[in-house]
């Protein structure tokens, strides 16, 4: 598969056509109470399974009881989870819910509802959207919160702050046809040159109540222009004045250092182009800046899949019709810039894994994000692939699952987060899987039930 993984090249005006039976449905009138019996419970803070089997009682969307098997729960629907593992709903802190996973040359209209359903199907019950059209993504967030649209709980940044011609504006200009480009660019990005322009752009966005500000500082493989440090600092300061944190997309050690010194609160990517320098690690660690490491998106972007079997089962289950065929078909001739990206991403495959280890040894908080929906990076399924690659980089499956549950939740909502953990009083976003993903991360895809706000959802695999 060939694509610019680091672009959101398929953000467009409206959602595309529906793909037959929805991947996930919420039964009409379904209760928000249920008891899951005889389950092994994942203790997210400790990255391990709690001893013995448990019954977990959910009432009115909250976890009410966690007890030895046989607890009384009169009147509640029951799920026998014998042999299964119950986890908190997964949390993905790098998504683009308004994007498309189709090849960038396909000019496919994204189906936002399909994307949202795919996250739920794969057990992701909370997402942070780090770049989608404004105000569309904020309306999406509100609709999901109101229950008028089915999807994971949404946190959103809205447009991406960048310099004129910077990332991702250069990707959008490259791949979008003119009849979409004029509409998408000013809604997907905020291209600013000076600190004063940056402050005004932030002030104009604040009425939409962004959960974070997304900043792009990445020269890529072809010397794409980047924000000046003083302009980045103006963005972060304006956000902090309104109690809004910032997250910077970076590609190199120098860009990571510049972003941290400009006041960003987190980094998206852990230099994707090179081994991280000791100086960068020291700067990140000293500032206590967490890093969303995003290994999978670069691997997907720099590799070719030639058979349907090259797509994981969870990918095939959520893929809209035609997506897999589109990637297996011969790609058009690629321009020099795209070929340079592929070489850079492929060449740093090992470096990205070493970076995870260096950051972890320095005590930096590692977070998990899929960067879906980028071409070839499917919503929901992308986080499963990301967690498998985090395990490849040296973490245990339990540690990877802790990152994708309690650590990600704490990043989004602080120490008092009411999700990301199976504990009394927490929001009943739950995933029941067959097997033991704490020992074998691949078992995470063996999902039997997804519970959202206490309601058991109905799942329907996509038909290819």
Image: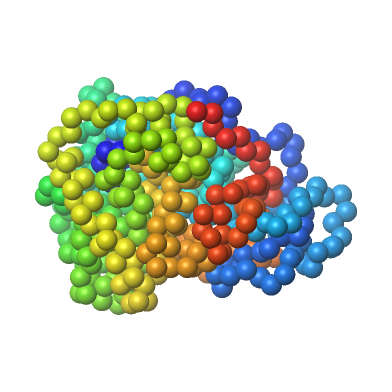
Relative to residue 187, is residue 227 drawn left or right?
A: left
Q: Residue at x 47, y 30 (%)?
A: 320
Q: Is 7 situated above or below 239? A: above
Instruction: Check the picture and name the quadrant holding the N terminus.
Output: top left
Q: Quarter of the image holding residue 293? A: bottom left
Relative to residue 109, is residue 25 drawn left or right?
A: right
Q: Observer-nearest residue: 397 or 31?
A: 397
Q: Is 251 situated above or below 457? A: below
Q: Residue at x 54, y 45 (%)?
A: 122
| Tag count | 0
Q: Position of residue 452 (x, y in %)?
A: 63, 48
Q: Residue at x 26, y 73 (%)?
A: 281
The answer to whether residue 205 of the structure is visible from this angle is: no
Relative to residue 154, is residue 452 drawn left or right?
A: right
Q: Observer-nearest residue: 357 or 247?
A: 357
Q: Observer-nearest residue: 385 or 179?
A: 385
Q: Position of residue 266 (x, y in %)?
A: 34, 63
The answer to whether residue 68 of the structure is visible from this angle is: yes
Q: Position of residue 336 (x, y in %)?
A: 12, 38
């Amino acid at each position: 598969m060939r694509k610019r993984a680091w672009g959101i090249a398929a953000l467009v005006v409206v959602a595309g056509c529906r793909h037959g039976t929805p991947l996930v449905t919420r039964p009409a009138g379904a209760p928000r109470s249920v008891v899951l019996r005889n389950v092994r419970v994942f203790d997210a803070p400790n990255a391990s399974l709690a001893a013995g089997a448990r019954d977990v009682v959910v009432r009115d969307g909250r976890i009410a009881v966690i007890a030895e098997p046989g607890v009384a729960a009169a009147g509640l629907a029951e799920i026998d989870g014998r042999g299964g593992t119950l986890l908190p709903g997964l949390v993905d802190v790098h998504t683009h819910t308004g994007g498309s996973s189709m090849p960038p040359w396909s000019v496919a209209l994204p189906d936002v509802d399909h994307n949202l359903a795919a996250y739920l199907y794969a057990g992701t019950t909370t997402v942070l959207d780090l770049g989608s059209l404004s105000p569309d993504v904020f309306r999406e967030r509100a609709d999901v919160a109101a229950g008028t649209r089915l999807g994971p709980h949404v946190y959103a940044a809205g447009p991406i702050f960048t310099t004129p011609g910077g990332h991702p504006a250069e990707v959008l200009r490259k791949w979008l046809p003119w009849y979409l480009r004029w509409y998408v660019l000013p809604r997907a990005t905020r291209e600013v040159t000076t600190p004063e322009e940056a402050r005004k752009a932030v002030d104009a966005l604040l009425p939409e109540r962004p959960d974070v500000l997304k900043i792009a500082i990445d020269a890529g493989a072809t010397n794409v222009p980047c924000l000046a440090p003083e302009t980045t600092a103006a963005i972060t300061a304006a956000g902090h004045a309104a109690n809004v944190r910032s997250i910077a997309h970076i590609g190199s050690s120098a860009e990571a250092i510049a972003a941290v010194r400009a006041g960003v609160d987190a980094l998206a990517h852990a230099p994707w182009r090179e081994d991280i320098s000791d100086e960068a690690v020291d700067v990140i660690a000293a500032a206590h800046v967490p890093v969303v490491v995003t290994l999978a998106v670069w691997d997907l972007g720099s590799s070719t899949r030639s058979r349907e079997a090259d797509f994981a089962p969870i990918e095939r289950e959520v893929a809209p019709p035609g997506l897999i065929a589109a990637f297996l078909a011969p790609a058009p001739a690629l321009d020099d810039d795209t070929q340079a990206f592929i070489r850079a991403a492929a060449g740093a495959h090992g470096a990205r894994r070493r970076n995870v280890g260096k950051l972890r040894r320095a005590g930096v908080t590692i977070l998990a994000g899929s960067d879906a929906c980028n071409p070839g990076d499917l919503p929901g399924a992308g986080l499963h692939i990301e967690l498998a690659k985090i395990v490849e980089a040296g973490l245990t499956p339990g540690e990877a699952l802790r990152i994708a549950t309690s650590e990600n939740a704490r990043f989004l909502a602080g120490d008092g987060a009411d999700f990301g953990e199976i504990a009394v009083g927490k929001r009943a976003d739950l995933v029941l899987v067959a097997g033991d993903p704490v020992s074998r991360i691949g078992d995470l895809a063996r999902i039997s039930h997804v519970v959202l706000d206490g309601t058991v959802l109905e799942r329907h695999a996509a038909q290819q």
